Image (tube, rainbow, N blue to C red):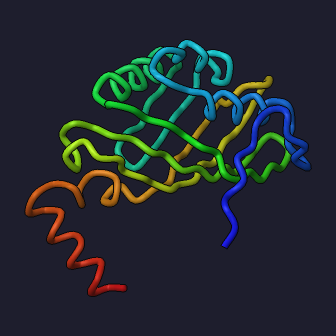
Amino acid sequence: MSSPTTYSASDEVPYQPDWLRTYVNTYNELHAGNLDRLAEIYQDNVVFVDPVHKIEGLNQLQDYFNNLYLNMNQCQFVITNTVANGHQAAIYWTMTFSHKKIKSGQDVVVEGHSLLKETEGKVVYQRDYFDVSSMVYEHVPIIGSIIKAIKSRIG
């Protein structure tokens, strides 16, 4: 099995518009010290939805990311694939993070994908899809054992 390809702004990826190249490059380089770069890729009126949150507005999104990174030992996104169609795109990503209260601070790897909608060169809507149980709940004592048992019976 081959390794996933990580795309950056300099890669020759077919059908990837400039706004998406900028987005990919920003996320591949995102860390706690450069969260101000979110303003380069998101509109002021962005709507950001994931399995746990719905956030409206760039300021609220920046606050969300600040809190996210504040509570983590480390967090890294790697965009592994993109599919673009005009002003929309699907991106596939892997997030690796560690949090002192989850899995005893060990790395947790979560794969997911996002639907992006763009206007005027920036993302105005993002909907993230990922398994929140593999991200958090499986690593919580008692609850984690129950979720893992349920998943093994289903699969």
29 vs 128, left or right, is right
User: Residue 63 location in percent, x, y?
Assistant: 40, 18
Up-down: is 131 above or below 86? below
User: Residue 152 location in percent, x, y?
Assistant: 29, 82
Quarter occupied by the N terminus? bottom right
**Which image quadrant is residue 124 in?**
top right
Quarter occupied by the C terminus? bottom left
Residue in the image at 66% along x and 51% along y: 80
- Front residue of this view, candidates 125 and 109: 109
Extreme residue in the left direction: 142
Q: How many marks?
A: 0
- Front residue of this view, candidates 39 and 96: 96
Residue in the image at 80% along x and 40% along y: 87
23 vs 154, left or right, is right
Residue in the image at 22% along x and 45% along y: 102
36 vs 73, left or right, is right
User: Residue 114 location in percent, x, y?
Assistant: 59, 48
Residue in the image at 24% along x and 42% along y: 105
User: Residue 22 location in percent, x, y?
Assistant: 75, 28
Up-down: is 43 above or below 148? above
